[in-house]
Image (cartoon, rainbow, N blue to C red):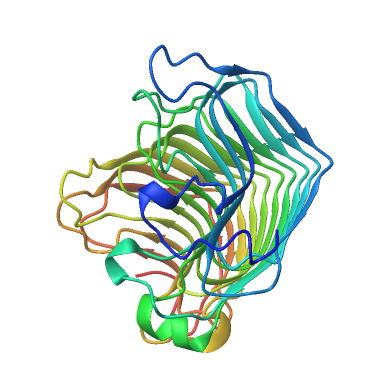
Amino acid sequence: MAAANFNNTSLAFSDRYGTHTVGIYAHGLLAAPWSPLVHPVIKGIRVVSEVQQGRSLSAVVVQNATQAKVIGNEIQGFPLGIGVRIQSCVLGCEVAENYIHDFVDNTTGWAVSSVPQITDIEVDNDIWNNVSSYHVIIRDNTIRNMLVGAAFLAVYGYQTDCINTPRVTTYNTSITGNHLDTCAEGVDNFSIHAVINDNVVMNTYNFGIKNVHGASFVSVNDNTTTNYGFAGIVVADSSAAGDSNVDNIIVSGNNVSFGNYGGNWGGHDNAAILVGMNGTTSIPVNIFVTGNILRPANGEYALNITTNSGVTVSGNLSLSGTKGVSK
């Protein structure tokens, strides 16, 4: 994807899906009668961006489709933007066995309100005909090196997600068997009735696996999370207007180790598992934390449960961090 042709420098919706922004674009009708694209397959393609920062691109976009397959591709070298966007896709859409790596940007000409970000796999940031995705399978992908530079970090924070499901109406997403290495957050989930199991998440600036903004009825089981910044696994409350409670989350059988990765979160009560963050409009309720192995090492706590959280804790092997076992 040559920079001369793929030269989008806008985060506005009107530029998000133009020919100067998207490498591979598969979609059904985006207006009435809204007929979906049936069973598109994007397989075995290598998509490489020319190295030029300060642009916002998407390698692969699939919209308004059924049974879509994005399998076995390599996506490399992008600036800001998204590796794979899945939107309004239903009936077993699958993003699997892709290798997505080495995205970086260090530019600062973006509006803070636009939230400039790098994301590798994203589900339903935008939707079509008011249809949220359901039964999307994200499995066995390798994602690594989603980076921002010091100038970008100072203005916007470390805005990189390996996998992001940013809509509470997205339903029945399965995120399993992925290897996620070096980003701000490994899995950032807002969706409901989701499974986040058997992933390896490592070297995260902020969080390994996060459920927030109304995410509910989610299983976070049998993941390995190591070298996390603020928390290996977090079930977070929120102060955003209109957010529902984060409800019915089970966190079980995970191995979480080595906190305060990079030394950026000392003194912030970082923890292997964190429930709550003192939000005011949405709180965690019916949260179950059981059977995990927690070894914060240079992190501060194994467990940090804030006072506004409804949590049942049992049967964890929790070793002490620099401030103790739990708070």
Whether residue 265 can be seen here? no
The image quadrant of residue 300 is bottom left
Horizontal side of residue 185 vs 2, given as left or right: left
Horizontal side of residue 296 vs 126, given as left or right: right
Residue at 54% x, 83% y is 149
The image quadrant of residue 67 is top right
Is 97 above or below relative to 269? above
Q: What is the count of numbered marks?
A: 0
Q: Position of residue 32 (x, y in %)?
A: 38, 15
Q: Position of residue 227 (x, y in %)?
A: 62, 73
In this view, the residue farthest toward the right is 44
Whether residue 317 can be seen here? yes
Q: Nearer the viewer, residue 181 or 153?
A: 153
Q: Position of residue 64 (x, y in %)?
A: 51, 25
In this view, the residue farthest toward the front is 4
Residue at 25% x, 42% y is 245
Q: Nearer the viewer, residue 12 or 83?
A: 12
Q: Quadrant of the N terminus?
A: bottom right
Residue at 79% x, 46% y is 73
Is 19 above or below relative to 182? above
Q: Position of residue 301 (x, y in %)?
A: 45, 74
Q: Quadrant of the C terminus?
A: bottom left
Horizontal side of residue 137 vs 274, given as left or right: right
Q: Nearer the viewer, residue 46 or 67?
A: 46
Residue at 62% x, 26% y is 93
Is 19 above or below relative to 172? below
